[in-house]
Image (spheres, rainbow, N blue to C red):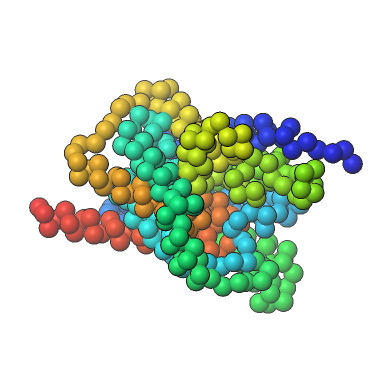
């Protein structure tokens, strides 16, 4: 067997992440793909089109990711999502706070990066505070509360927390059989709901849902296949090159911003390198900027007053904290994690929606009261 030099795979992972995220940013800007906007449309206007786009993306990602695993190309258990440590309180609290934060910050992690590419300086401030809070939650002051309080509320689910593994143990069935069954049921239900209304069938809605789902699948392939080393010559263990988690990754937009900030601060430290996550965040900004320039929609935008500034700063901090505690954002858990059919990802997804919806209702009540 020819020995693989892990360093030789790094360019494939970095450029692969940048390219698929560039596509995400370009299409996300064009189609106005926004998970916070999806919740807002439902809560405030009863319009489900952007929510259907999000659900279609999840369905496509589930089918693609599960087929990659069935085909033996990747193992989703090598990601952080389906692990046996079920930190239920972290999923709920992280999801709720992220939902509150993305409402106050006018967009989730991915939409914030898309807006930065379009010239929105408000979103740039949100990104900065999100990165700082995320880093503080990973390795700083906020991390003490995360580890000593939230993560203590956990249950060990031997064999993994993904629905196929849980169902296989519950019913005594083969896991592969349950993968097929649950993939068809869950992805089929989400896809059917998304496509049920004829008004949803516009080019942009279909493009956004399908492409976003596919770039998540592409991320799994780049990190889990192109960047996989069966035996690292240094550790003699399997490895996934150029990842911050040292596991297989796909798109997520909170922790990568913390690691991007760390890279900038410790640039001369040779141990800090450009990774899949950092490259993907840069790719989203670049893709969005490209679309904004091509479509002539690029424009500078800033805060209207101090209250607006404070609102976005708080939103960024809550997203940074919540995104780390809950192991991801509306993309990281809501689509990437959901594609593994991990129970924690589904709980986080639901918690994000609840947090955002309650905040929107409160904001509407507050505005009416002031009026």
Residue 299 x/y as whole percent? 32, 26
174 lies left or right of 327? right
219 lies left or right of 332? right
Residue 102 x/y as whole percent? 36, 50
Residue 169 seen by the camera? yes
In front here: 180 or 109?
109
- The quadrant of the picture occupied by the N terminus is top right
**Residue found 39% across the figure and 61% down from its top:** 96
**Residue found 34% across the figure and 38% down from its top:** 125
In front here: 237 or 229?
237
Residue 141 x/y as whole percent? 42, 54
User: Vertical placement of 187 versus 134: above or below?
Assistant: below
User: Vertical placement of 292 versus 62: above or below?
Assistant: above
User: Vertical placement of 308 versus 48: above or below?
Assistant: above
240 lies left or right of 95? right
Residue 196 x/y as whole percent? 46, 55
**Residue found 35% across the figure and 29% down from its top:** 119
In front here: 139 or 54?
139
């Amino acid at each position: 067997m020819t020995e693989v030099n892990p360093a030789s795979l790094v360019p494939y992972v970095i450029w692969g992440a940048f390219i698929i995220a560039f596509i995400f940013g370009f299409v996300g800007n064009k189609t106005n793909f926004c998970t916070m906007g999806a919740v807002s449309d439902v809560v405030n206007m009863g319009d489900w089109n952007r929510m259907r786009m999000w659900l279609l993306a999840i369905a496509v990602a589930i089918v693609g990711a599960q087929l990659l695993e069935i085909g033996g190309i990747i193992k989703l258990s090598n990601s952080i999502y389906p692990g046996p440590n079920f930190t239920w309180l972290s999923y709920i609290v992280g999801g709720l706070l992220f939902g509150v934060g993305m409402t106050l910050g006018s967009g989730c992690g991915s939409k914030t990066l898309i807006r930065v590419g379009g010239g929105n300086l408000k979103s740039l401030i949100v990104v900065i505070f999100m990165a700082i809070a995320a880093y503080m939650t990973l390795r700083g002051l906020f991390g003490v509360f995360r580890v000593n309080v939230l993560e203590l509320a956990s249950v060990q689910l031997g064999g993994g927390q993904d629905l196929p593994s849980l169902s296989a143990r519950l019913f005594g069935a083969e896991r592969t059989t349950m993968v097929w069954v649950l993939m068809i049921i869950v992805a089929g239900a989400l896809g059917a709901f998304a496509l049920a209304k004829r008004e949803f069938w516009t080019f942009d809605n279909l493009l956004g849902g399908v492409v976003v789902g596919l770039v998540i699948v592409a991320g799994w392939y780049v990190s889990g296949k192109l960047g996989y080393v069966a035996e690292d010559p240094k550790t003699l263990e399997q490895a996934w090159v150029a990842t911050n988690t040292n596991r297989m990754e796909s798109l997520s937009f909170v922790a990568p911003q913390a690691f991007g900030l760390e890279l900038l601060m410790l640039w001369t430290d040779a141990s800090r390198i450009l990774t899949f996550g950092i490259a993907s965040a840069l790719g989203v900004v670049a893709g969005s900027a490209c679309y904004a320039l091509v479509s002539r929609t690029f424009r500078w935008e800033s805060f209207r007053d101090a209250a607006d500034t404070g609102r976005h700063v708080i939103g960024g901090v809550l997203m940074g904290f919540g995104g780390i505690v809950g192991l991801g954002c509306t993309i990281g858990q809501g689509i990437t994690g959901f594609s593994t059919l991990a129970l924690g990802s589904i709980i986080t997804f639901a918690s994000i929606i609840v947090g955002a919806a309650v905040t929107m209702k409160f904001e509407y009540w507050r505005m009416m009261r002031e009026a």
